[in-house]
Image (cartoon, helix red, strand yellow):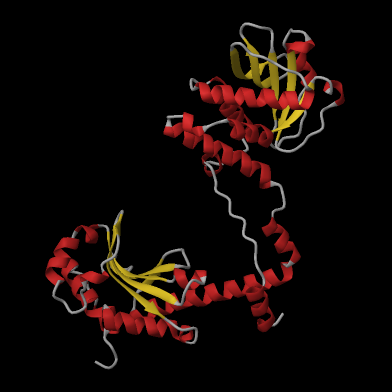
Amino acid sequence: MSFTELYVFLNETEIPLEKRKDGFLEIIRKDHNENINSNIYAYYLSCEIEELKSTFLDALLSIIYEKTLRKFQFTRAFTTTEMTTSNGRIDIFIRDLINPVAIIIENKIHHRLNNDLLEYWNYFKSKDANKIGILLTLHNHVIPENVKDKFINITHWEWISKIKNIIDLNNINDTSQKIYLNDFFKTIENLTTTYKMNDSAKFFFQNAKKINETYETLLEGHKFLNDQYELIASKLGLQTFGSEITWKNIWDESNLIDTYFTIITKDLILGKAYKYQIILELNREDKAKESEIKEKFQNHPQFNNEYIGISKDSYKHLQVRDYEISIEELSRFSEIVISQIQKDFADLFIQIIKFLYPNKDISRWENNFILESQ
């Protein structure tokens, strides 16, 4: 494919983007853990917040009725997990402490079904009319022949969707509980859609050749910019630091000097604008001396309070300047950035270094910051 064809493809094709928000269980990589999943259901089925407890159980009973026309009533429900039987463990077991009614739940997220559901069924000694088994899965699953009249299949999303339709979160005063509940809903939604082909995945396979060629151009663009960072550092006699393509520190690594330049090219990389930033940054102990620096250099011609940036954690953006660049000028990116550093930052930078590090020898690179016209 020619660059012209690639350009047309990128500019005339609407690319579907599917963005998902991870819940806490995804972050700690426990979203596929069936025991944790069962414990969360059990918590809500037996928690002290009546609105939550009744909603989780009522939603489940409603689905059971829709699928079987069987009505189950609980006077005082009690939920346990990992109940040991002769040959296994029942994931979630809901029983009534007053009446001989029970729900036996086998919770499956991604494992194959190899449990003895009949043995689980027989564990609870009650009439068949007083109990029901549920195979709880991410997607529709066939019930084994020997328990077809005893177990039904309910998906996690069926249960959660029913809960969401019933519950009124405004009746729950505990803010943290609202956060936990919504987080759990999001995890179940993510799990349910994980194995489905969404529009983004479908678009890729329909346009794989073009997209792969596009990816090759992305790599070339990133390589060019990374090489430019290295060229800037090399010409200034400094070194680069940072693993992100959208920013890079330019610093004196051998002297361990914590006042340095940061070049941010996020707008360029993301295609938002032909803009970038050059930042004079203080880190660690240098940041702690910010007030001394400001007092000493407030009258320096390159120091301007309008260009002072953010302060966060261990670093401080002492001077921040925004620059625009054309696509034609990008081929000379390193040359242009060096010129701007020399023009807008150089003398201030060197004076601050000498103030903070009077015993450091910077003669190796100091003259690289002098403009050729000077």
Quarter of the rendering containing residue 360 = bottom left
Q: Nearer the viewer, residue 355 or 282?
A: 282
Q: Determine the residue positioned at 66% across, 83% down.
A: 4
Give x and y (percent) for residue 302.
21, 78
Report the number of discs. Answer: 0
* Residue extending farthest top: 98
Q: Determine the residue positioned at 30% across, 61% down.
A: 310
- Residue 373 lies, with reference to residue 11, above or below; the image says below
Give x and y (percent) for residue 266.
45, 68
User: For the C terminus, which image quadrant?
Assistant: bottom left
Give x and y (percent) for residue 39.
57, 26
- Residue 214 lies, with reference to residue 175, above or below; the image says below
Q: Is residue 54 visible?
A: yes
User: For the N terminus, which image quadrant?
Assistant: bottom right
Quarter of the rendering containing residue 68 = top right
Position of 5 with respect to 40 (left or right) is right
Position of 79 with respect to 47 (left or right) is right
* Residue extending farthest bottom: 373
Q: Determine the residue positioned at 70% across, 63% down.
A: 204
* Residue extending farthest right: 145
Q: Nearer the viewer, residue 116 or 286?
A: 116
Give x and y (percent) for residue 149.
84, 20
Q: Is residue 30 visible?
A: no
- Residue 8 lies, with reference to residue 76, above or below; the image says below
Quarter of the rendering containing residue 217 = bottom right
Position of 208 with respect to 142 (left or right) is left
